[in-house]
Amino acid sequence: MNKASKICYGTLSLSPLQCSYSLQEKTSLLLYAFQKGINFFDTAELYGNYDILRELIKNINRKDIYISTKSYAYSRDTLDESILKALTEMGTDYLDVFMIHEQESIHTFRGHYTAIERLQELKALGVVKNIGISTHFHEAVRDVGTQKEVDIIHPIFNEKGIGIVDGNISQMKDSLKLVKSFGKKVLGMKPLGGGHLTDDPIRSLRFSFESPLIDWTAVGMRYREEIDFNLSVLNNDSGHELLLDSINRKPRRLDIAEWCSGCGACLSKCQHGALQLIDGKCLVDPDKCVLCSYCATACRDFCIKII
Ligand code: SF4
Ligand code: SF4
């Protein structure tokens, strides 16, 4: 992973869950990012978009990119199913990183341990190069990130700690300092808090790009201008303002993920009456929503994003 680019293309933004572009449009964005120097791509079984990586691989040399994916596999069999699906649908014979998705604590890690054991066997065979976990919990970073089986941790990391379920950014930093002392690598996620930290995106991106705790930052991008903007912030190039102006003119909306449990915790945060529960799911009225982001902090499952 030594040559993986500091910016990792977080492809949830190009998943059918969030994006209705054609396969060709999505592939063209990945190719554009690759041509601009981004060679690290993160996906997940949940995102349902292995096809875009397959198309990317067809157009370049597989060895020139790094692919990370993840699933909720909890046993040898479910892990094998996930790996087979990833390899087959992407058209590759190895994965640079495979993570167990959304670990909450050392207890969930132990609950998935037979999948971790199988991952270790696949790592010895060269099918998986690195084993990781993704998490929204600083305690999982601390307790699971220090385990010998784990090479890479993929935690939420943004200046306001948006999305950290069990604490704040200061606690996340403390946990990351610990795992870094164990020599682990860190792929930060949500530097813009799922679209809620766009008041000063340059400062928010730099918070992650410049942190010694973060090796790579996964950023979701849906426009060429976003790719250019993020790279210009990373490289400290001029022209931020023009690019930002162009991005700000793109339409934005509040998106509530399909995995919303309908707990209702976000409803009271909205002073505009834009949220309601219908048939056990939270729905937003786009005519009332002013994209203020107040509701996002109430959702422990990180369902609410501005896209
Ligand atoms: S972003 Fe603001 S206005 Fe929109 S639903 Fe959330 S709290 Fe309400
Ligand atoms: S807080 Fe999250 S999970 Fe609960 S209703 Fe709102 S969006 Fe859905």
Image (cartoon, rainbow, N blue to C red):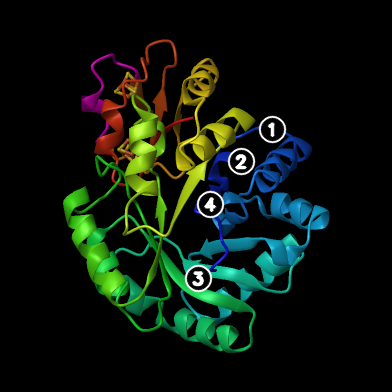
Front disc: 4 or 2? 4
Dot 4 falls on a residue whose secondary structure is strand
Q: CA distance from mark 4 to mark 1?
A: 20 Å
Front disc: 4 or 3? 4
Q: Are marks 2 and 1 in contact (CB under 8 Å)?
A: yes
Q: CA distance from mark 3 to mark 1?
A: 29 Å
In the image, is residue 39 above or below residue 222? below
Give the extent of the magenta segment: 265-274
Q: Nearer the viewer, residue 98 or 258?
A: 98
Q: Quadrant of the N terminus?
A: bottom right
Q: Amino acid at mark 4?
A: Cys
Q: Nearer the viewer, residue 223 or 229?
A: 229
Q: How many other residues sit within 10 Å of disc 2, few (<14), some (14-19) or many (≥20)?
A: many
Q: Residue at x 39, y 60 (%)?
A: 102
Q: CA distance from mark 4 to mark 2?
A: 14 Å
Question: Which label was assigned to residue 21?
Answer: 1
Quadrant hosting residue 109: bottom left
Q: How many other residues sit within 10 Å of disc 4, few (<14), some (14-19) or many (≥20)?
A: many
Residue ID for mark 2: 14
Q: CA distance from mark 2 to mark 3?
A: 23 Å
Question: Which label was assigned to residue 8?
Answer: 4
